[in-house]
Amino acid sequence: MTEAMRKTVCDLHAELVRNNLVVWTAGNVSGRVVGEDLFVIKPSGVTYDELTPQNMVVCDLDGNLVAGEHAPSSDTAAHAYVYRNMPEVNGVVHTHSTYASAWAARGEAIPCVLTAMADEFGGEIPVGPFALIGDDSIGQGIVKTLKGHRSRAVLMQNHGVFSIGPTPKAAVKAAVMCEDVARTVHVAKQLGEPLAIAQDDIDRLYDRYQNVYGQQRSPR
Ligand SMILES: [Zn+2]
């Protein structure tokens, strides 16, 4: 299980690069090793070109290093806090992607003005609190904002995006979609106020996309 997750998490980091969500060594993906109270995460300070399944780092749910030659990502405590407090979450992604982080810099939630947002996020993408790295503050902010919320992404104020999912791939998808809608709504706002979508239409779109759309057995 752990070996398979090392490969999954390593491969998904390439999606962050492919989708222009990261620069240099910023950004990270993690995946829970289901049933083992462990997760796999990016090593700290290693460039994307150098990532291999073997140099991924394995941590316990308190964020302690269990296996790996490198130190875990400096965001490990935040990932660990999410896994401890949201058992339904099996993947966590963090990026400083440009447009989403620009909304975070203003502390402004992205309003649900696109049907694609209603589909994927079921409403606005919310803002989480300002929090410094070093303790559980970031993890607490993520969990407090996303627990019970439809959105799988949160804009941590003055910082960037954390996204979650039932699989690591789903969390990466949420990070990609978050940046996409952040950019589109930003562009829309340059020439006027985007039109709101009625709440019952948002509800219908979300329900259809989450329950009917696509291949039922593929992980979302
Ligand atoms: Zn960060």
Image (cartoon, rainbow, N blue to C red):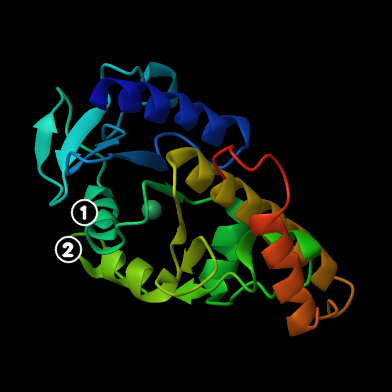
Q: Secondary structure at mark 1?
A: helix
Are circles 2 and 1 on residues that touch, CB within 8 Å?
yes
Please count the marks in the image: 2
Relative placement, left or right, of 148 versus 212 is left
Residue 3 picture quarter: top left
* Quadrant of image for the N terminus: top left
State the image coordinates of residue 148 (x, y, percent, origin top left): 44, 75
Residue behind mark 1? 77
Q: Amino acid at mark 2?
A: Asp
* Quadrant of image for the C terminus: top right
State the image coordinates of residue 44 (x, y, percent, origin top left): 26, 35
Residue 207 picture quarter: bottom right
Give the mark, 2 or 1, whose residue is nearer the N terminus. Answer: 1
Relative placement, left or right, of 171 versus 194 is left
Residue behind mark 2? 135
State the image coordinates of residue 160 (x, y, percent, origin top left): 47, 59
Q: Amino acid at mark 1?
A: Ala
Q: Going 63% across and 73% down the picture, which residue do you hit? A: 124
State the image coordinates of residue 55 (x, y, percent, origin top left): 26, 20
99 over 107 or under it: above or below: above
Q: Secondary structure at mark 2?
A: loop
